[in-house]
Amino acid sequence: MPVPELPPPRSSLPEAVTRFGATALGAVAARARETSDAFGTWSGAPTPPAPPAGLPSGPSSNALSPTAPAETGVPANGAPGPGPGLERLLRGPHGLGTAGLRLTPRAEPPEPVAAEKGRPIPGLYYHPAPEPDPGRVDEVSRRIKAWALDEVSLYPEEWEEQFDGFSVGRYMVGCHPDAPTVDHLMLATRLMVAENAVDDCYCEDHGGSPIGLGERLLLAHTALDPLHTVREYQPDWAASLHADAPRRAYRSAMDYFVRAAGPSQADRLRHDMARLHLGYLAEAAWAQQDQVPEVWEYLAMRQFNNFRPCPTITDTVGGYELPADLHAQDDLQKVIALASNATTIVNDLYSYTKELDAPGRHLNLPVVIAEREGLSDKDAYLKSVDIHNELMHDFETEAAALAAACPVPSVGRFLRGVAAWVDGNHHWHQSNTYRYSLPDFW
Ligand SMILES: CC(C)=CCC/C(C)=C(\C)COP(=O)(O)OP(=O)(O)O
Ligand SMILES: [Mg+2]
């Protein structure tokens, strides 16, 4: 039976911008005024200066200037799109000399899609992403395989097909359209591979188990956050980092990352990885007890067992730095959590059939809703789509509000980087038919 193509629902961008006074962000904006970043020096006041009427903003002004001209906001698939506030966020810098600074061109049609396969989930709110640059994909794919085999001995020969089917090069090139070089893309790609090695080998279907997971994760975490102890025991720890593939991968990926990142960017990643490991432990505890959590408990766990460490390195991969105090502000933390939660529920939806087919019970949002709320599999899945859509709308609302309230160039670029990651992540899940297929609900 043919499946009706439902357009993604309209963005519900509200007037949240008006809720954000300059007070909450005044201090960080003031400090940021003194900070140069990849876009130039911020030279405004906490409330952003509007360029003279009729003139485009210059390179140092933010894309979210309240005076930026409104666009219709129709996304590439012809579906109704985000409102003008979000549109300004997504459009990126404009005016003379800023063309090279733009990110995903959301209001324009995507590139012709050569390799795209798979179809989007009907009713899912998402933004189509352009097909990742094939030249970059080839180069990242070549280099990541060499790293996996030659530098960290990641997998035995029989796993090669799964490694290739994961298409990590395509994934990371699509999620980081503003990476200046392939070297920058490799920072994200190594980490993505290492994170999946830990998940597969410690937690899931390549030898993983909830039993003893806490010990394995803690020892692997020291590959990211080094042990500093007495001389007698330091060599034992150093040797342990080579003891298995997940630790070799973490150690090496982090080593490359630390050399490219600033100290606070590296520390941000360590913190996000600790969050991830905490999430793995809660999931494992439920598996060990054969327990299905309540829906809100599952959502809390999934906020930690989450893609978050991937979008939050967007500035390092983009070759600039979001200052630590700007990253730490509550409103940005909320935006990051909402975006990361949306990306992770996308995984729950696209990996639903794969996880149903796996041995044992694999928790994901539709499974938990069906169990805890007594819904049919289909209704639980559709409710999960609605939950995803609400998270996406909230992300976009909060991001637009923050960008308006904190018009610092590095914040605007970071928010666009997170949005690009969200779109690239959806594109990869939708098109990776090697790993994922949709249930037969429509
Ligand atoms: C890359 C990274 C930080 C991963 C963290 C956790 C993770 C593996 C996911 C959020 C993906 O979820 P899941 O384990 O369900 O993956 P698959 O569905 O098996 O692709
Ligand atoms: Mg999954």
Image (spheres, helix red, strand yellow):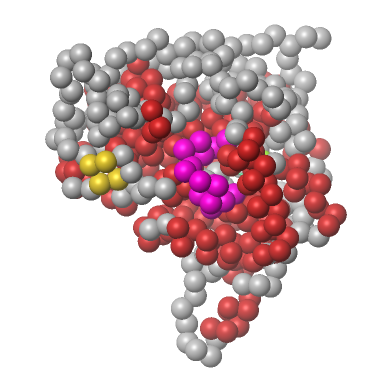
Q: Quadrant of ligand 2?
A: top right
Let me know if residue 178 is in the magenta part.
yes
Residue 232: x and y in percent read 53, 90
From this viewpoint, is residue 334 visible? no
Q: Which of the 4 quarters of the picture holds residue 221? A: bottom right
Depth check, front residue: 301 or 111: 111
Outermost residue, bottom side: 232
From this viewpoint, is residue 426 visible? yes
Residue 353: x and y in percent read 76, 32
Q: Is residue 147 left or right of residue 299?
A: right
Q: Is residue 54 left or right of residue 242?
A: left
Residue at the location (63% across, 66% down)? Answer: 247
> What is the magenta range?
174-189
Residue 355: x and y in percent read 74, 39
Residue at the location (70% across, 53% down)? Answer: 145
Outermost residue, front side: 97
Residue 212: x and y in percent read 67, 65
Residue at the location (70% across, 9% down)? Answer: 4
Q: Is residue 336 left or right of residue 207?
A: left
Task: Check the image and report above or below for 193 versus 252.
Answer: above
Depth check, front residue: 384 or 8: 8
* Magenta stretch, main secondary structure class: helix
Task: Check the image and report above or below for 367 versus 310.
Answer: above
Q: Which quarter shows the N terminus?
A: top right
Depth check, front residue: 238 or 67: 67
Q: Which of the 4 quarters of the picture holds residue 87? A: top left
Depth check, front residue: 412 or 332: 412
